Image: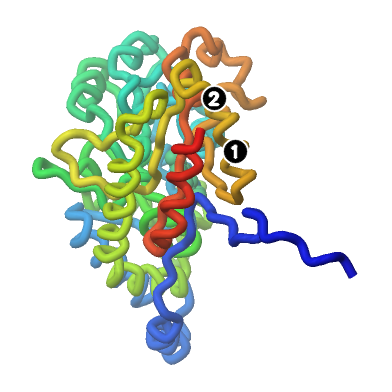
Amino acid sequence: MRPEQKKSPSDRKPIPVTRPFLPPLAEFIPYLERIWESRWVTNGGPQHQELERALCRYLNVPFISLFNNGTNALLTALQALDLPEGSEVVTTPFSFVATAHAIKWNRLTPVFSDVEPTHGNLDPATIEAAITPRTRAILPVHVYGNPCDTAAIADIAERHDLKVLYDAAHLFGVTRPARPPLRDGDLSVLSFHATKVFGTFEGGAIVCSSEAMKKRIDSLKNFGFTGETTVAEVGMNGKMNEVQAAFGLLALTHIDEALARRRAVAERYTAALAGIPGIGIVRPSVGVTPAWPYFPITVEAAHLGKSRDDLFEEFKRHDILPRRYFYPLISSFAPYRDLPSAAPEKLPVAARFAEQVLCLPIFPDITGEEIERTITVIKAT
Ligand SMILES: *Cc1c(COP(=O)(O)O)cnc(C)c1O
């Protein structure tokens, strides 16, 4: 037998960047019983319909179509915009790779343009510069749940006759006194992946503004069926099942508590980290009530004496697993790097963000001890 080892940091439970919020199992049973009783397990069952209504109310949006994941919702949303094959779609390199994949899957060409330095959202000035006669749409991302400059983007879209699809995967729970950012653009897409603020294990949704569009999307996510014996177009299987929807209904009863806990964690991090030279906090937009899907900080090596990657390694040595969202840039991945718009020198702000950002652990049931351990690693550098 090996001699008893001294308790080292690695004996402690690792702290992930996020952890799905699971209410007590007993609370889920009644929802499952309803499914077992009705034997309606997918294809727009009663809890699916109930979740669509409940989300419209909670998010203050007119129409929602649920999906089995956010990526399929993105694919279908772009399809529903009816852009001619080969059209260009201006988008951001600073996002999760699914954003650009949705463009390619639809046989459209992504055109990357640079982000602004405050929140890492598409910079309206660079969008305008990326527009060509082939541009038909803009696909911005509300990165970290900070709403894009939707007014400036709407203005560009109107002047150039472009569609706007927002990747709103991070936007759940973010509110502002004016109109909800989910109502901006032609369509918005949410993700309900387990790691997001509101999760259905896997899941997603498209938010739209007309009943006709909702009907079209409902058909597109169901193989293109428009009636029992009619198929109008090439649709996918994007349907959310009844177990996912049931969990969504349960999760919604806990969402305000989950958001309040995220805000409390963010407050503690902000108080502890503000003022440390070389550490920046990506703060929420003014006038917005944030949901804190992530807690992104930026590391300036020249001031901290340590690069972001040094700090990342230091965290790992302490069994803390922050994530470098979003590094590498989408534009550097094999399917995209040969595009003219993917040249790193054309995307300097996004490149700097990708090099400096680190998302700290944040989730509703993170403990005070886990938060303090995380802060200590940064303070000790
Ligand atoms: C999570 C995420 C997606 C994909 O959503 P899935 O539900 O995992 O398919 C798309 N875009 C962004 C920005 C995301 O963070």
Which of the numbered marks, if any, corresponds to residue 1?
none
Q: Position of residue 172 (x, y in %)?
A: 31, 51
Colour convention: rainbow
Q: Residue at x 39, y 10 (%)?
A: 132
Q: Is 148 on the left-hand or right-hand side of 66?
A: left
Q: Is 29 on the left-hand or right-hand side of 321?
A: left
Q: Is residue 115 above or below residue 175?
A: above
Q: Position of residue 145 (x, y in %)?
A: 32, 41
- Secondary structure beneath label 1: helix
Q: Position of residue 330 (x, y in %)?
A: 54, 28
Q: Tag 1 or tag 2, which sits nearer the N-term?
A: 2
Q: Residue at x 13, y 42 (%)?
A: 179
Q: CA distance from mark 2 to mark 1?
A: 10 Å
Q: For this rendering, which residue is in front, 290 or 105?
A: 290
Q: Residue at x 50, y 50 (%)?
A: 17
Quarter occupied by residue 379:
top left
Asked if the residues shown at circle 2 and circle 1 are in contact, with their CB atoms under 8 angstroms apart, the answer is yes
Q: Residues within 10 Å of mark 2 (few under 14, many from 20)?
A: some
Q: Position of residue 211 (x, y in %)?
A: 23, 53
Which of the numbered marks, if any, corresponds to residue 314?
1
- Secondary structure beneath label 2: loop
Q: Is residue 352 above or below residue 247?
A: above
Q: Is 343 on the left-hand or right-hand side of 44?
A: right
What is the three-letter code of the residue carrying label 1?
A: Glu
Q: For this rendering, which residue is in front, 88 or 300?
A: 300
Q: For this rendering, which residue is in front, 332 or 208?
A: 332
Ligand 1 within 8 angstroms of badge 2 C-beta:
no
Q: Which residue position is annotated with label 2?
A: 306
